[in-house]
Every structure is written in structure tokens, then in C-alpha cells.
Image: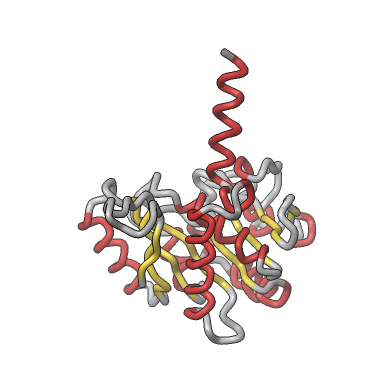
Amino acid sequence: MFRTKKKRKLLTLARKLVTVYDSKSILSEQFRTIRTNITFSLCEQDEKTMLITSSIPGEGKSTNAANIGIVFAQEGKKVLLVDADMRKPTIHHTFHLTNTVGLSSLLIRQKILETIIQTTSVEGLSVITSGPIPPNPAELLASKAMNEFFETVKKEFDIVIFDAPPLLSVTDAQILANKCDGTLLIVNTGVVEKLNVIKAKSILINAQAKILGVVLNNYVFPRNHHSNQYYNSIE
């Protein structure tokens, strides 16, 4: 029984980081297509920061953020993935990292940047975990320290990806969307209601965010489609 559970857990992790464990799969190819679309959308030289969010919890934003970070690193880019979900962090689980210090530690001036950046098994990909869960995430993300963080990492990395909480739950993603050069919205097909997606888009527009596009997660193509893809991106 124990071995079965352990094997199931490993298979789940493999699916999460499909761009590492099965880089030649159709799904990995779709992440590379998303990478290409993002590259064309972030066309200015100084546009390096990107927010990945969703309208409601459980739409796959963290999995998408991790795999998109990986495919950019596989392209030779110097990538930083930041877990900006200081309410329900997950990135440290995905990459098997510690979360004793992280973004929250930096924003309260407890740690400096160099001490919270962690390397991963993926060459070129670094991660900043959320750190200890603070009582005031929104205030920290809107702080002067966060603005300074943006300026510093834009000088050090080719692309910086923020994994943020859902838009309809808290204001954190709205704050970050205004600071980032672009925002990618994850939509869990067949699960999230259309009205919630419309509300999420409205929030991003009000935040003056640059919407890069929408990723349809778990989308199932019709049987007569040319392949069995179940991920796709649209503008």
C-alpha cells in the first residue's frame, strides 16, 4: 500500500513538471508554443516580468508557471520563478525546496535577495519561495520594498515569473498585475464559470495590466482534431 501511494505521488510530480520528465510530449510542445507567444508579446527589451494567475483557485496556475519557467530556461534564458502566493504557497513543494525564508522574508527586510534565491535541478531556473506566511500579504506586495525587488531582479534575470493567488479571491494578483510587464490568465476549461473569467478580465483591465493571453487548461480537442492535444493557448 505504501509503495503504491509513493509511486502515485511520483507520477503526480512527473505530470506537474512534464517539460522536464517528458520534454518531447505534445504537452511540452504546447508549453513551448506558449513561450513563443509570450516572447512576441513581451517585445520591448525591458519587459521581463510576467504574472500568472487565474480567476478562482485550482485552475492550474502554479503548474503552468513552473512549466513555463522551465521551457524559458531550456531555451537558455536566465529565469526567476517567484512564489508570490503568500497565502497558499506551493512552488517549494513542486521543486522540493525549503520554505523557511523567501519573498516575505525579503519584504520585511529580514533577509537580502542573495540569501533567498534557490537553484533548481533545471539549469538556468532559480526560484524564490514565498517564505513564512505573513499576516498582510497585500500590503507587502504594494510596498516600497517590492518595487525595489522588481528593479533589482529585472537587472539580474532575462525573465521573472510571478505565481500569484486567484484574482477573485484577494487583491494580491491585482497589485502585481499593475507592476508586471504582462499577465497570463489560466482558465480551467469546463470548471470555471464564464462570468468569473469575465470578472477576472475586468479586474486586470482596471489594474491597467497588459493581458498577454489566456491558457485553456485541460481543454479537450474534438476527436477529429489532428492530434490528441489537451492544452492550448489563445490570444
Answer with left or right where residue 189 lies relative to residue 144.
left
Q: Nearer the viewer, residue 61 or 170?
A: 61
Say whether residue 137 is visible: no
Marks counted in the figure total: 0
Q: Quadrant of the C terminus?
A: bottom left
Q: Quadrant of the N terminus?
A: top right
Residue extending farthest to the top is 1
Say whether residue 175 is visible: yes
- Residue at image position (39%, 64%) is 233
Answer with left or right where residue 191 lies relative to residue 70.
left
- Residue at image position (68%, 58%) is 106
Residue extending farthest to the bottom is 44
Which quadrant would residue 168 be assigned to in this image? Answer: bottom left
Q: Nearer the viewer, residue 57 or 170?
A: 57
- Residue at image position (62%, 58%) is 70
Q: Nearer the viewer, residue 163 or 187?
A: 187
**Colour basis:** secondary structure
Q: Position of residue 201 (x, y in %)?
A: 30, 67
Residue 90 vertical placement versus 81 (above, below):
above
Q: Position of residue 119 (x, y in %)?
A: 75, 54
Residue extending farthest to the right is 114
Answer with left or right where residue 99 lies relative to residue 63.
right
- Residue at image position (46%, 53%) is 61
Residue 215 vertical placement versus 208 (above, below):
above
Which quadrant would residue 174 be assigned to in this image? Answer: bottom left
Q: Position of residue 164 (x, y in %)?
A: 49, 56
Q: Position of residue 190 (x, y in %)?
A: 26, 48
